[in-house]
Amino acid sequence: MQAKKRYLILLSAGASLVLLFYLGGVELPAARSRHDRSRHGYRPDQPWPHFSDPLQPLLAWDHTDTEEYNLHVSPRQKRDVNTSVYKGKRCRMDSCFDFGLCQRNGFKVYVYPQQKGEKISESYQNILSTIEGSRFYTSDPGQACLFVLSLDTLDRDQLSPQYVHNLKTKIQNLPLWNDGRNHLIFNLYSGTWPDYTEDLGFDIGQAMLAKASISTENFRANFDVSIPLFSKEHPRTGGDRGFLKYNSIPPFRKYMLVFKGKRYLTGIGSDTRNALYHVHNAEDVVLLTTCKHGKDWQKHKDARCDKDNAEYDKYDYKEMLHNSTFCLVPRGRRLGSFRFLEALQAACVPVMLSNGWALPFSEIIDWNTAAVIGDERLLLQIPTTVRSIHQDKILSLRQQTQFLWEAYFSSVEKIVLTTLEIIQDRVQEHGSRSSLMWNSHPGGLFTLPQYSAYLGDFPFFYATLGIKPLPKFTAVIHAVSPLVSQSQPILKLLVSVGKSQYCAQIVVLWNCDKPLPAKHRWPATSVPVIVIEGENKVMSSRFLPYDTIVTDAVLSLDEDTVLSTTEVDFAFTVWQSFPERIVGYPARSHFWDSNKERWGYTSKWTNDYSMVLTGAAIYHRYYHHLYTNYLPTSLKSMVDQLANCEDILMNFLVSAVTKLPPIKVTQKKQYKETMMGQVGVSINLKTFPNLLFSSGSSRASRWADPDHFAQRQTCMNKFASWFGAMPLVHSQMRLDPVLFKDQVSILRKKYRDIERL
């Protein structure tokens, strides 16, 4: 009897094993090895792949692989997930991005040519135009590191008129698609009524997403980029500045907390907004909703609709926005909301109520310094929470909203460029920006890590780090005329500058068509004089980041500038207190010509100025790097073709970075130079009182040419168009030495020689 039981047990065990092998529940070791190798693309005739990056930690647990998930999800739902946006949710930079494409030509972005007959929304056209106008763009796909589709993927709501049909087939037929590898897909709206999922309706493969309203559950950290939801009216370039004009103390406004928006009676996103009336007190907490939207809203109206609608119409939204300390940003149908950017611009501290939203650019931005992150489940505690925030903290939060708005969100251009810079930092991890660079003025877009990895090498972080710039400068003299006489102004200039106690060296940039003069033609100085030939003999070469410039400060000079040693010393002393600005002597200004509806340029003597010309100015050497690597080729080519306006362009750049005017130093008492203009052209020294050039100089002749002045007017408007706004800032400040022109003994004055000039 016992023998029969043993045989039955063995028989049943054997049958079970056979059944397991048949169903694939157990794999033989050899079979598993073949399966794994084929799955990863291994073939015996290929060598093992080389991975330069270190191994990453194990990915988080995937609930779709569990038995419990499979029991409760239908086959159709599983199929939908596998063909949706989440198919590549395990993708990371080290597994779904080919770094080799970026090592050959750097970080270049290719935009597919637009296909005939394909419609593109205005917003997506703005995105593509921004990329094509950036320094990252390449028209050669062979040089590209990143690829962007010309097919409009912004709106994937099937009920939207902007929805592009048959997108899946169109993308799969692209010759460079390669399962989405090294591709970036932009998206603002995904899913449709009633659940508004994050499904884009096509397989993105291994592509990265730059997506609005993306959840933390589906956000692939350090692979996707969360972008803000912006409207079609959002400006392509420039954008309005923030509304915080004055730092009022204490920083409280009329309202403590406000919101005005739609209330959804059914479907996703309705819970939070439907509960706002519990917190509304119609005094300092004003939370208004309306259910009066959509075609059939009356069919679903509830008992509160009429009262809510009446209260809603009593308040002006802009007036509330500009007069509130905090602005509630609850989720809508999707996680993101237009209210987010509106609050940032208005310096109304956003109070986030959207659980699970991966906040825009959260990879680089510390939102705890600019927003209050709330919890939808704790709505009733929000008023108490915001009231408990100290006024110093409120002021800090408001200031940070203005910085973030202007640095990263005020235009489509800034949103797109921030996205590309984030990806570039991942690709070039050894040269990526620090958190301080991203979260403090002037922001990551103007702080190029290719210049230096050390914060102390940038002029913006001296105060934060408690350091000062080097106490020496390098003079760079731009020479365009042949050296034919020992009495030429450039030789006198070399002697004057060389006598400065702060001068470390003098660099003569030889942009003349004639050969370099012999070494003995240059005067003897106590500092080294280095003569280098300009690259291609063009104007922009004066702002190249030459390795010979080893000091923080650059004294930029034209060959015919007249400056004394005392003036050089005083200008440098002033610059040491303002190392992020241009400091110098010859000032100019801009104005808006309402008759011609364009910007004008003037050199008339007024109380205002907005530019200091680089013919006699000191600035930080980082601006050479920024001028060369940040500005587009089109602007620099314009400067080179005209042989004009390079000084204006540098002023535009520095003011765009600092949001501050340059600094003019002591005005000379008088200038004795005589302008030698063309026949029939007279120069009134009352109109041009602050010319700083020697008698008979080539620069004086250029200023006498009316075409030269007209070119500068054209440059002003061309530059303003590229920057998207006028970055120049007017100032009435002029810095003079202590006791300047005071009726005291000259012996008590440090810069006594300036008054004699």
Image (cartoon, helix red, strand yellow):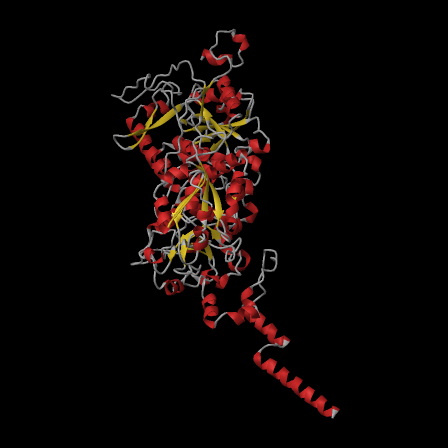
Using residue 328 as the reference point, say whether residue 161 is left or right of it. left
x and y, in percent, of residue 407 in the image: 45, 40
The one of 45 and 755 positioned closer to us in this rendering: 755
Is 639 located above or below residue 227 in the figure? above
x and y, in percent, of residue 282 in the image: 42, 41
Residue extending furthest front?
A: 303
Is 130 located above or below residue 254 in the figure? below
Which image quarter is the N terminus in?
bottom right
Which image quarter is the C terminus in?
top left
The one of 292 and 704 positioned closer to us in this rendering: 292
Q: Is residue 10 visible?
A: yes
Q: Name the residue rendered at 70%, 90% in the picture.
A: 7
x and y, in percent, of residue 486 in the image: 44, 20
Using residue 748 as the reference point, say whether residue 674 is left or right of it. left
x and y, in percent, of residue 156 in the image: 38, 58
Q: Is residue 134 visible?
A: no
The one of 459 and 616 positioned closer to us in this rendering: 459
The one of 308 and 488 positioned closer to us in this rendering: 308
How many discs appear?
0
Q: Name the residue rendered at 54%, 60% in the picture.
A: 95
Q: Name the residue rendered at 64%, 75% in the picture.
A: 29
